[in-house]
C-alpha cells in the first residue's frame, strides 16, 4: 500500500494482515482510525476480499477499479473462447486458429504483418472468435475515454452486446462489469490506477528473493525500508 503519487510503501509489516486499509485499523488505535478516515479514494482490483476490507474500514472512500484488471477479464475470456473454438473445430478450421494466441491478445498497433494476416483469417473463418476479439478491443477503447457519462453509456452498451454475444465467458465478464460499473467509471473520471503499487510490489518481491538466509522478518523489513523508503545514506568516509 502507498499514497497516490508516492513511491514508498506505508508501514511494511510481517505476517499476512487483512488486505487494504484494514491493516491500519486492526489494533483499534487512533492512528489506524485516523488513516482510514482520511482515505478519499482507493485503487484496487476486483478481489472481493479487498473490496470488503476497504468498504468496512473506509466506507466513505471512493473505490476505483484498476483498468488493467478490468481489461484482464476480457483478455482471459478471449483466450477461453479461443481454446473452446479450437476444441470444437475440424482440421481445416484449426489451421486458421493455430498461432493466433498472441495476435488476438496484442494491441492492433503492435501487430506484425503475419499476425495481421492471422486475424484476417479468423475474421473470415471463425465469427465467434472474431466477435470475442472485437469485444476485447472495444472494452479497451471505452476505458481510453475521458468523458464519464459517455464511458458509462458505452459500458452499458458493451454489457448488452456481451450478454447477447452467445459467448459464455463474455457473459460472465458482462455480469462482473455491470456489478462494479461505478468503480470502473471512476477510473475514467480520475485516471488513477494501481500501476505504481504493482511496480512497488514487484520491487519488494525482488528484495525478498535477495533475502534468503535472513534469520527473521525484521531484517527483511529493514531492507525493504532501506531500498524503498526514500532513505538517503551519507557514509562518514565520503
Image: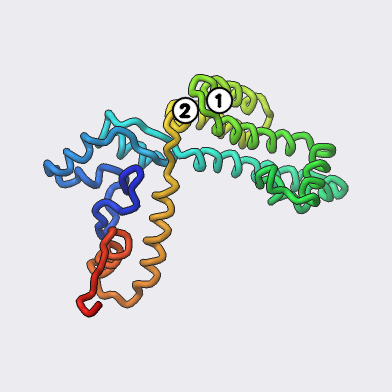
Q: Is residue 41 above or below residue 26?
A: above
Q: Say left or right for 137 vs 152.
A: right
Answer above or below: position of 12 versus 5. Answer: below
Q: Residue furthest bottom?
A: 237
Q: Residue 114 at x, y = what percent?
A: 80, 51
The structure residue drawn at horizontal position 25% and vertical position 43%, both measured from the top left corner, is: 22
Give how far across and how far down residue 186 sits, in percent.
Answer: 43, 29
Count neighbours of disc 1 (C-alpha within 10 A) and say few if under 14, some if 14 to 19, many if 20 or more.
Answer: many
Label 2 residue SS? helix
At horizontal 77% and vertical 49% (from top left) the residue drawn is: 115
State left or right for residue 88 relative to residue 135.
right
* The quadrant where residue 129 appears: top right
Q: Which residue is mark 1?
A: 155
- Residue toward you, 79 or 194: 194
Toward which corner of the image does residue 84 lie, by quadrant? top right
**Label 2 neighbourhood size at 10 Å, few (<14), some (14-19), many (20+)?**
many
Task: Verify CB contact (< 8 Å) between mark 1 and mark 2.
Answer: yes
Residue at x-position 69% and y-position 38%: 133
Whole-percent x, y for residue 68 in the image = 51, 42
Q: Secondary structure at mark 1?
A: helix
Quadrant containing the C terminus is: bottom left
Residue 185: mark in rendering: 2
Amino acid at each position: 500500500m502507498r499514497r497516490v503519487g508516492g513511491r514508498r510503501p506505508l508501514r511494511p509489516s510481517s505476517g499476512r494482515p487483512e488486505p487494504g486499509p484494514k491493516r491500519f485499523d486492526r489494533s483499534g488505535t487512533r492512528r489506524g482510525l485516523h488513516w482510514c478516515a482520511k482515505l478519499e479514494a482507493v485503487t484496487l482490483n476486483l478481489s472481493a476480499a479487498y473490496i470488503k476490507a476497504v468498504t468496512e474500514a473506509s466506507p466513505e472512500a471512493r473505490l476505483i477499479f484498476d483498468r488493467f484488471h478490468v481489461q484482464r477479464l476480457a483478455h482471459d475470456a478471449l483466450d477461453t473462447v479461443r481454446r473452446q473454438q479450437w476444441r470444437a473445430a475440424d482440421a481445416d478450421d484449426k489451421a486458421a486458429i493455430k498461432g493466433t494466441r498472441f495476435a488476438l491478445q496484442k494491441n492492433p498497433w503492435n501487430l506484425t504483418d503475419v499476425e495481421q494476416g492471422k486475424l484476417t483469417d479468423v475474421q473470415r473463418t471463425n465469427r465467434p472468435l472474431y466477435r470475442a476479439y472485437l469485444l476485447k478491443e472495444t472494452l479497451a477503447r471505452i476505458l481510453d475515454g475521458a468523458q464519464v457519462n459517455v464511458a458509462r453509456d458505452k459500458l452499458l452498451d458493451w454489457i448488452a452486446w456481451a450478454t447477447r454475444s452467445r459467448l459464455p465467458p463474455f457473459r460472465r465478464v458482462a455480469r462482473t462489469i455491470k456489478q462494479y460499473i461505478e468503480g470502473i467509471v471512476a477510473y475514467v473520471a480520475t485516471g488513477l490506477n494501481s500501476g505504481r503499487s504493482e511496480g512497488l510490489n514487484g520491487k519488494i518481491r525482488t528484495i525478498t528473493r535477495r533475502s534468503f538466509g535472513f534469520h527473521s522478518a525484521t531484517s527483511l523489513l529493514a531492507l525493504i525500508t532501506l531500498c524503498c523508503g526514500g532513505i538517503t545514506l551519507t557514509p562518514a568516509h565520503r
